[in-house]
Image (spheres, rainbow, N blue to C red):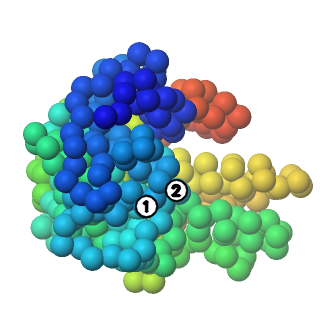
Amino acid sequence: MISDDRVRELLAGRRWFAGDASTAQVLERTELDCDPPLTDVLVASDGHRYQLVVDADGAEVDDNVADAYGLLKVVAPDEEVSSVRHLAAEQSNTSFVFDERILLKLFRKVGDGPNPDVDVPQALRRAGFGHVPDVLARWQRDGRDLAVVQPFLAGATDGWTLALTSLRQLFAEGTDPQSAGGDFAPEATRLGAMTADMHVALYAAFGQDRADPGLLAKSVANGQCEPQLSHIDDGGALIRVHGDYHLGQVMRTDEAWFVCDFEGEPARSELERIAPNSPLKDVAGMVRSFDYAAAVAAREQDADVHALARAWERYNRVEFLESYWTAIHGSELVPRSHADAVALMEAFELEKALYEVNYERAHRPAWAEIPEAAVARLRA
Protein backbone atom coordinates (compact mmCIF):
# COMPACT_ATOMS: atom_id res chain seq x y z
CA MET A 1 0.00 0.00 0.00
CA ILE A 2 1.32 3.44 -0.91
CA SER A 3 2.82 5.34 2.01
CA ASP A 4 1.90 8.83 3.13
CA ASP A 5 5.40 10.02 2.30
CA ARG A 6 5.12 8.70 -1.27
CA VAL A 7 1.76 10.47 -1.65
CA ARG A 8 3.31 13.76 -0.55
CA GLU A 9 6.20 13.20 -2.96
CA LEU A 10 3.73 12.71 -5.84
CA LEU A 11 1.81 15.87 -4.93
CA ALA A 12 4.84 18.15 -4.94
CA GLY A 13 5.05 20.22 -8.10
CA ARG A 14 1.73 19.12 -9.61
CA ARG A 15 0.05 22.00 -11.45
CA TRP A 16 -3.37 20.98 -10.14
CA PHE A 17 -2.22 20.87 -6.50
CA ALA A 18 -2.35 24.22 -4.73
CA GLY A 19 -1.68 23.06 -1.18
CA ASP A 20 1.43 22.32 0.88
CA ALA A 21 2.60 18.83 -0.02
CA SER A 22 4.72 18.50 3.12
CA THR A 23 1.67 18.76 5.41
CA ALA A 24 -0.91 16.96 3.23
CA GLN A 25 -2.93 14.35 5.09
CA VAL A 26 -4.15 11.10 3.50
CA LEU A 27 -7.89 10.79 4.17
CA GLU A 28 -8.61 7.44 2.57
CA ARG A 29 -7.19 4.78 0.27
CA THR A 30 -9.56 2.73 -1.87
CA GLU A 31 -8.40 -0.34 -3.76
CA LEU A 32 -9.98 -0.38 -7.21
CA ASP A 33 -11.18 -3.59 -8.82
CA CYS A 34 -9.30 -3.38 -12.11
CA ASP A 35 -6.31 -4.63 -14.06
CA PRO A 36 -3.70 -3.32 -13.50
CA PRO A 37 -4.55 -2.89 -9.80
CA LEU A 38 -4.93 0.74 -8.80
CA THR A 39 -5.49 2.64 -5.57
CA ASP A 40 -7.58 5.79 -5.32
CA VAL A 41 -6.17 8.17 -2.72
CA LEU A 42 -7.96 11.21 -1.28
CA VAL A 43 -5.79 13.82 0.41
CA ALA A 44 -6.60 16.89 2.50
CA SER A 45 -4.53 20.06 2.21
CA ASP A 46 -5.29 23.69 3.03
CA GLY A 47 -9.01 23.01 3.36
CA HIS A 48 -9.33 21.17 0.03
CA ARG A 49 -9.63 17.52 -0.94
CA TYR A 50 -7.43 16.21 -3.76
CA GLN A 51 -7.40 12.92 -5.62
CA LEU A 52 -4.57 10.71 -6.89
CA VAL A 53 -4.75 7.31 -8.56
CA VAL A 54 -1.61 5.20 -8.13
CA ASP A 55 -0.51 1.76 -9.29
CA ALA A 56 1.17 -1.08 -7.41
CA ASP A 57 4.59 0.43 -8.09
CA GLY A 58 3.65 3.76 -6.53
CA ALA A 59 3.42 5.55 -9.89
CA GLU A 60 0.64 8.06 -10.43
CA VAL A 61 -1.75 7.45 -13.32
CA ASP A 62 -0.60 10.74 -14.82
CA ASP A 63 2.95 9.35 -15.01
CA ASN A 64 2.04 5.93 -16.39
CA VAL A 65 -0.55 6.27 -19.13
CA ALA A 66 -0.96 2.47 -19.35
CA ASP A 67 -2.71 2.63 -15.96
CA ALA A 68 -5.48 4.67 -17.58
CA TYR A 69 -6.93 1.48 -19.09
CA GLY A 70 -7.68 0.19 -15.61
CA LEU A 71 -9.17 3.49 -14.58
CA LEU A 72 -11.48 3.48 -17.61
CA LYS A 73 -12.75 0.01 -16.62
CA VAL A 74 -13.70 1.42 -13.23
CA VAL A 75 -15.53 4.45 -14.63
CA ALA A 76 -17.04 2.96 -17.82
CA PRO A 77 -16.74 -0.85 -17.63
CA ASP A 78 -18.57 -1.46 -20.93
CA GLU A 79 -16.12 0.53 -23.04
CA GLU A 80 -13.69 -1.53 -25.14
CA VAL A 81 -10.65 0.45 -26.29
CA SER A 82 -7.25 -0.22 -27.82
CA SER A 83 -5.31 3.06 -27.53
CA VAL A 84 -4.84 5.83 -24.99
CA ARG A 85 -2.99 9.11 -24.76
CA HIS A 86 -2.67 11.81 -22.15
CA LEU A 87 -4.32 15.11 -23.01
CA ALA A 88 -1.48 17.45 -22.16
CA ALA A 89 -3.58 20.64 -22.24
CA GLU A 90 -5.32 19.85 -18.94
CA GLN A 91 -4.16 21.84 -15.91
CA SER A 92 -6.66 21.62 -13.06
CA ASN A 93 -7.66 18.01 -13.87
CA THR A 94 -6.14 15.10 -15.80
CA SER A 95 -7.67 13.75 -19.01
CA PHE A 96 -7.03 10.73 -21.20
CA VAL A 97 -8.25 10.14 -24.74
CA PHE A 98 -9.12 6.59 -25.77
CA ASP A 99 -9.31 5.54 -29.43
CA GLU A 100 -9.68 9.24 -30.31
CA ARG A 101 -13.39 8.91 -29.51
CA ILE A 102 -13.91 9.09 -25.73
CA LEU A 103 -12.36 11.27 -23.04
CA LEU A 104 -11.92 10.37 -19.38
CA LYS A 105 -11.45 13.31 -17.05
CA LEU A 106 -10.09 12.55 -13.59
CA PHE A 107 -11.09 15.29 -11.16
CA ARG A 108 -8.16 16.38 -9.04
CA LYS A 109 -10.02 18.62 -6.59
CA VAL A 110 -12.93 16.68 -5.11
CA GLY A 111 -15.81 18.61 -3.56
CA ASP A 112 -18.47 17.56 -1.08
CA GLY A 113 -21.05 16.70 -3.74
CA PRO A 114 -21.63 16.42 -7.48
CA ASN A 115 -19.11 18.15 -9.74
CA PRO A 116 -20.55 20.98 -11.88
CA ASP A 117 -18.60 19.65 -14.86
CA VAL A 118 -20.94 16.65 -14.81
CA ASP A 119 -24.21 18.13 -13.57
CA VAL A 120 -24.24 21.28 -15.71
CA PRO A 121 -23.66 19.66 -19.14
CA GLN A 122 -26.34 17.08 -18.37
CA ALA A 123 -28.79 19.82 -17.38
CA LEU A 124 -27.95 21.92 -20.45
CA ARG A 125 -28.54 19.01 -22.82
CA ARG A 126 -31.89 18.32 -21.16
CA ALA A 127 -32.71 22.00 -21.75
CA GLY A 128 -32.00 21.59 -25.46
CA PHE A 129 -28.52 23.13 -25.56
CA GLY A 130 -26.40 20.83 -27.69
CA HIS A 131 -23.10 22.72 -27.52
CA VAL A 132 -21.71 20.62 -24.64
CA PRO A 133 -20.34 17.07 -24.79
CA ASP A 134 -22.72 14.42 -23.48
CA VAL A 135 -21.97 12.49 -20.27
CA LEU A 136 -21.39 8.81 -21.06
CA ALA A 137 -20.42 7.69 -17.56
CA ARG A 138 -19.61 9.17 -14.18
CA TRP A 139 -17.67 7.77 -11.26
CA GLN A 140 -18.94 8.69 -7.80
CA ARG A 141 -18.30 7.69 -4.22
CA ASP A 142 -20.30 8.96 -1.24
CA GLY A 143 -22.07 11.42 -3.56
CA ARG A 144 -18.80 12.96 -4.79
CA ASP A 145 -17.84 12.96 -8.46
CA LEU A 146 -14.38 11.49 -9.00
CA ALA A 147 -14.28 11.20 -12.81
CA VAL A 148 -16.43 11.52 -15.93
CA VAL A 149 -16.35 9.99 -19.41
CA GLN A 150 -17.56 12.02 -22.39
CA PRO A 151 -17.29 11.88 -26.20
CA PHE A 152 -13.97 13.24 -27.42
CA LEU A 153 -14.35 16.10 -29.89
CA ALA A 154 -11.97 14.68 -32.48
CA GLY A 155 -10.47 17.31 -34.74
CA ALA A 156 -11.67 20.18 -32.53
CA THR A 157 -9.48 23.19 -31.82
CA ASP A 158 -9.81 25.35 -28.73
CA GLY A 159 -10.64 29.01 -29.13
CA TRP A 160 -7.33 30.12 -27.64
CA THR A 161 -5.36 28.31 -30.34
CA LEU A 162 -7.59 29.69 -33.08
CA ALA A 163 -7.20 33.22 -31.74
CA LEU A 164 -3.40 32.98 -31.56
CA THR A 165 -3.30 31.58 -35.11
CA SER A 166 -5.39 34.53 -36.31
CA LEU A 167 -3.12 37.01 -34.55
CA ARG A 168 0.08 35.47 -35.90
CA GLN A 169 -1.27 35.66 -39.43
CA LEU A 170 -2.27 39.26 -38.88
CA PHE A 171 1.25 40.11 -37.69
CA ALA A 172 2.79 38.31 -40.65
CA GLU A 173 0.63 40.22 -43.15
CA GLY A 174 0.84 43.56 -41.34
CA THR A 175 -2.61 44.62 -42.49
CA ASP A 176 -5.82 45.47 -40.63
CA PRO A 177 -7.79 42.69 -38.85
CA GLN A 178 -10.70 42.84 -41.31
CA SER A 179 -8.40 42.16 -44.28
CA ALA A 180 -6.08 39.55 -42.77
CA GLY A 181 -6.33 35.99 -44.03
CA GLY A 182 -6.97 34.58 -40.57
CA ASP A 183 -9.92 36.85 -39.74
CA PHE A 184 -11.36 35.64 -36.42
CA ALA A 185 -14.48 37.83 -36.55
CA PRO A 186 -16.85 35.19 -38.00
CA GLU A 187 -15.90 32.88 -35.13
CA ALA A 188 -16.29 35.68 -32.58
CA THR A 189 -19.78 36.33 -33.97
CA ARG A 190 -20.79 32.66 -33.72
CA LEU A 191 -19.30 32.50 -30.24
CA GLY A 192 -21.35 35.48 -29.08
CA ALA A 193 -24.62 33.96 -30.27
CA MET A 194 -23.76 30.57 -28.76
CA THR A 195 -22.90 32.22 -25.44
CA ALA A 196 -26.33 33.85 -25.33
CA ASP A 197 -27.97 30.51 -26.11
CA MET A 198 -25.99 28.93 -23.26
CA HIS A 199 -27.26 31.54 -20.81
CA VAL A 200 -30.86 31.06 -21.90
CA ALA A 201 -30.43 27.31 -21.44
CA LEU A 202 -28.80 27.77 -18.02
CA TYR A 203 -31.82 29.82 -16.99
CA ALA A 204 -34.17 27.09 -18.28
CA ALA A 205 -32.19 24.39 -16.47
CA PHE A 206 -31.52 26.07 -13.12
CA GLY A 207 -33.93 29.02 -12.90
CA GLN A 208 -33.17 32.61 -11.99
CA ASP A 209 -33.51 35.33 -9.37
CA ARG A 210 -33.79 39.03 -10.07
CA ALA A 211 -30.61 40.86 -9.21
CA ASP A 212 -30.79 43.59 -6.59
CA PRO A 213 -28.86 46.43 -8.27
CA GLY A 214 -27.50 47.80 -5.00
CA LEU A 215 -26.29 44.44 -3.73
CA LEU A 216 -24.84 43.62 -7.15
CA ALA A 217 -22.90 46.90 -7.19
CA LYS A 218 -21.47 46.13 -3.75
CA SER A 219 -20.47 42.59 -4.69
CA VAL A 220 -18.72 43.08 -8.06
CA ALA A 221 -14.96 43.51 -7.52
CA ASN A 222 -15.63 43.81 -3.77
CA GLY A 223 -17.47 47.07 -4.28
CA GLN A 224 -14.72 48.79 -6.25
CA CYS A 225 -17.21 49.46 -9.07
CA GLU A 226 -20.03 50.72 -6.85
CA PRO A 227 -19.77 54.39 -8.01
CA GLN A 228 -19.73 53.23 -11.62
CA LEU A 229 -22.93 51.19 -11.05
CA SER A 230 -24.80 53.59 -8.74
CA HIS A 231 -27.20 54.69 -11.51
CA ILE A 232 -28.33 51.18 -12.47
CA ASP A 233 -31.90 50.38 -11.40
CA ASP A 234 -32.14 47.01 -13.16
CA GLY A 235 -29.40 44.44 -12.68
CA GLY A 236 -30.96 41.78 -14.87
CA ALA A 237 -31.04 38.21 -13.62
CA LEU A 238 -28.89 36.02 -11.43
CA ILE A 239 -28.50 32.58 -12.97
CA ARG A 240 -26.15 29.63 -12.87
CA VAL A 241 -23.17 30.73 -14.99
CA HIS A 242 -20.13 29.03 -16.46
CA GLY A 243 -17.91 30.94 -14.06
CA ASP A 244 -14.55 30.65 -15.82
CA TYR A 245 -15.51 31.44 -19.39
CA HIS A 246 -12.65 32.14 -21.80
CA LEU A 247 -11.22 31.08 -25.15
CA GLY A 248 -9.54 28.03 -23.65
CA GLN A 249 -12.91 26.68 -22.48
CA VAL A 250 -14.55 26.58 -25.91
CA MET A 251 -13.79 24.10 -28.69
CA ARG A 252 -14.50 24.59 -32.41
CA THR A 253 -15.41 21.54 -34.46
CA ASP A 254 -16.38 21.53 -38.14
CA GLU A 255 -20.01 21.86 -37.05
CA ALA A 256 -20.09 24.32 -34.14
CA TRP A 257 -18.57 25.73 -30.96
CA PHE A 258 -18.70 23.54 -27.84
CA VAL A 259 -18.33 24.64 -24.21
CA CYS A 260 -16.20 22.69 -21.73
CA ASP A 261 -15.22 22.78 -18.06
CA PHE A 262 -18.00 24.16 -15.84
CA GLU A 263 -16.01 23.87 -12.61
CA GLY A 264 -15.47 27.64 -12.29
CA GLU A 265 -12.40 29.69 -11.40
CA PRO A 266 -9.88 27.43 -9.63
CA ALA A 267 -8.97 29.95 -6.92
CA ARG A 268 -12.57 30.42 -5.77
CA SER A 269 -14.39 28.34 -3.15
CA GLU A 270 -16.87 25.62 -4.03
CA LEU A 271 -19.79 27.76 -2.91
CA GLU A 272 -18.60 30.77 -4.91
CA ARG A 273 -18.34 28.65 -8.05
CA ILE A 274 -21.97 27.50 -8.00
CA ALA A 275 -23.56 30.69 -6.64
CA PRO A 276 -25.97 32.42 -9.08
CA ASN A 277 -24.47 35.43 -10.80
CA SER A 278 -25.09 37.76 -13.70
CA PRO A 279 -24.56 36.15 -17.12
CA LEU A 280 -22.43 39.21 -17.87
CA LYS A 281 -19.73 37.68 -15.67
CA ASP A 282 -19.21 35.10 -18.43
CA VAL A 283 -19.33 37.76 -21.13
CA ALA A 284 -16.64 39.74 -19.33
CA GLY A 285 -14.50 36.63 -18.98
CA MET A 286 -14.57 36.03 -22.72
CA VAL A 287 -13.68 39.59 -23.70
CA ARG A 288 -10.84 39.51 -21.15
CA SER A 289 -9.66 36.41 -22.98
CA PHE A 290 -9.51 38.33 -26.26
CA ASP A 291 -7.25 40.86 -24.54
CA TYR A 292 -5.07 38.06 -23.17
CA ALA A 293 -4.71 36.41 -26.57
CA ALA A 294 -3.68 39.70 -28.18
CA ALA A 295 -1.12 40.42 -25.46
CA VAL A 296 0.37 36.91 -25.45
CA ALA A 297 0.66 36.80 -29.24
CA ALA A 298 2.35 40.22 -29.28
CA ARG A 299 4.91 39.07 -26.68
CA GLU A 300 6.00 36.29 -29.05
CA GLN A 301 7.08 38.74 -31.75
CA ASP A 302 10.44 40.43 -32.13
CA ALA A 303 8.88 43.49 -33.77
CA ASP A 304 6.52 45.92 -32.04
CA VAL A 305 3.06 44.70 -33.04
CA HIS A 306 1.12 46.04 -30.08
CA ALA A 307 -0.97 48.40 -32.23
CA LEU A 308 -2.03 45.53 -34.47
CA ALA A 309 -2.73 43.33 -31.45
CA ARG A 310 -4.90 46.02 -29.87
CA ALA A 311 -6.78 46.52 -33.14
CA TRP A 312 -7.46 42.77 -33.31
CA GLU A 313 -8.74 42.77 -29.73
CA ARG A 314 -11.08 45.72 -30.25
CA TYR A 315 -12.40 44.37 -33.57
CA ASN A 316 -13.23 40.91 -32.26
CA ARG A 317 -14.56 42.25 -28.98
CA VAL A 318 -17.11 44.32 -30.91
CA GLU A 319 -18.11 41.35 -33.10
CA PHE A 320 -18.56 39.07 -30.09
CA LEU A 321 -20.51 41.60 -28.04
CA GLU A 322 -22.80 42.73 -30.83
CA SER A 323 -23.70 39.13 -31.55
CA TYR A 324 -24.32 38.45 -27.86
CA TRP A 325 -26.47 41.57 -27.32
CA THR A 326 -28.56 40.73 -30.38
CA ALA A 327 -29.16 37.13 -29.31
CA ILE A 328 -29.89 37.88 -25.64
CA HIS A 329 -32.18 40.86 -26.37
CA GLY A 330 -35.62 40.49 -24.82
CA SER A 331 -34.66 37.65 -22.47
CA GLU A 332 -34.56 39.82 -19.29
CA LEU A 333 -31.35 38.05 -18.31
CA VAL A 334 -29.41 41.30 -18.70
CA PRO A 335 -30.43 44.87 -17.75
CA ARG A 336 -33.13 46.33 -20.01
CA SER A 337 -31.00 49.41 -20.65
CA HIS A 338 -28.14 48.62 -22.99
CA ALA A 339 -26.03 51.33 -21.33
CA ASP A 340 -26.60 49.67 -17.94
CA ALA A 341 -25.73 46.26 -19.39
CA VAL A 342 -22.46 47.60 -20.80
CA ALA A 343 -21.57 49.30 -17.50
CA LEU A 344 -22.22 46.09 -15.58
CA MET A 345 -20.22 44.02 -18.04
CA GLU A 346 -17.27 46.41 -17.76
CA ALA A 347 -17.44 46.16 -13.97
CA PHE A 348 -17.16 42.40 -14.28
CA GLU A 349 -14.19 42.95 -16.59
CA LEU A 350 -12.42 44.84 -13.83
CA GLU A 351 -13.30 42.12 -11.33
CA LYS A 352 -11.87 39.48 -13.66
CA ALA A 353 -8.71 41.49 -14.31
CA LEU A 354 -8.12 41.92 -10.57
CA TYR A 355 -8.55 38.16 -10.11
CA GLU A 356 -6.07 37.58 -12.94
CA VAL A 357 -3.49 39.87 -11.33
CA ASN A 358 -3.52 37.77 -8.16
CA TYR A 359 -3.46 34.51 -10.11
CA GLU A 360 -0.57 35.52 -12.35
CA ARG A 361 1.52 36.90 -9.50
CA ALA A 362 1.14 33.56 -7.74
CA HIS A 363 1.60 31.21 -10.72
CA ARG A 364 3.09 33.08 -13.72
CA PRO A 365 4.76 36.29 -12.56
CA ALA A 366 6.05 37.08 -16.05
CA TRP A 367 2.47 37.37 -17.27
CA ALA A 368 1.23 39.62 -14.45
CA GLU A 369 1.75 42.75 -16.55
CA ILE A 370 -1.07 41.66 -18.89
CA PRO A 371 -3.92 41.96 -16.35
CA GLU A 372 -2.14 44.85 -14.57
CA ALA A 373 -2.36 46.85 -17.79
CA ALA A 374 -6.02 45.91 -18.12
CA VAL A 375 -6.76 47.08 -14.58
CA ALA A 376 -5.14 50.43 -15.34
CA ARG A 377 -7.23 50.82 -18.52
CA LEU A 378 -10.48 49.81 -16.84
CA ARG A 379 -9.93 52.19 -13.93
CA ALA A 380 -8.99 55.13 -16.16
Percent position of residue 212, x then y? 20, 32
Res 311 quadrant in image = bottom right
Give neighbour class at mark 1: few <14, some 14-19, many 20+ (Cα, 10 Å): some
Task: Identify the mark at residue 89; answer none if there is no mark.
Answer: 2
Residue at x 61% of width, y 48% of height: 292
Q: Which quarter shows the N terminus?
A: top left
212 vs 348, left or right, is: left
The amino acid on which the numbered mark 2 sits, given as a three-letter code, is: Ala
Instruction: Please tell me whether mark 2 sits on a helix, a strand or a loop.
Output: loop
Residue at x 15% of width, y 60% of height: 123
Instruction: Please tell me whether mark 1 sits on a helix, a strand or a loop.
Output: helix
From this view, report whether residue 128 is shown above or below residue 317: below
From this view, report whether residue 199 is shown above or below residue 78: above
Res 128 quadrant in image = bottom left
> Which residue corresponds to mark 1?
66
The amino acid on which the numbered mark 1 sits, given as a three-letter code, is: Ala
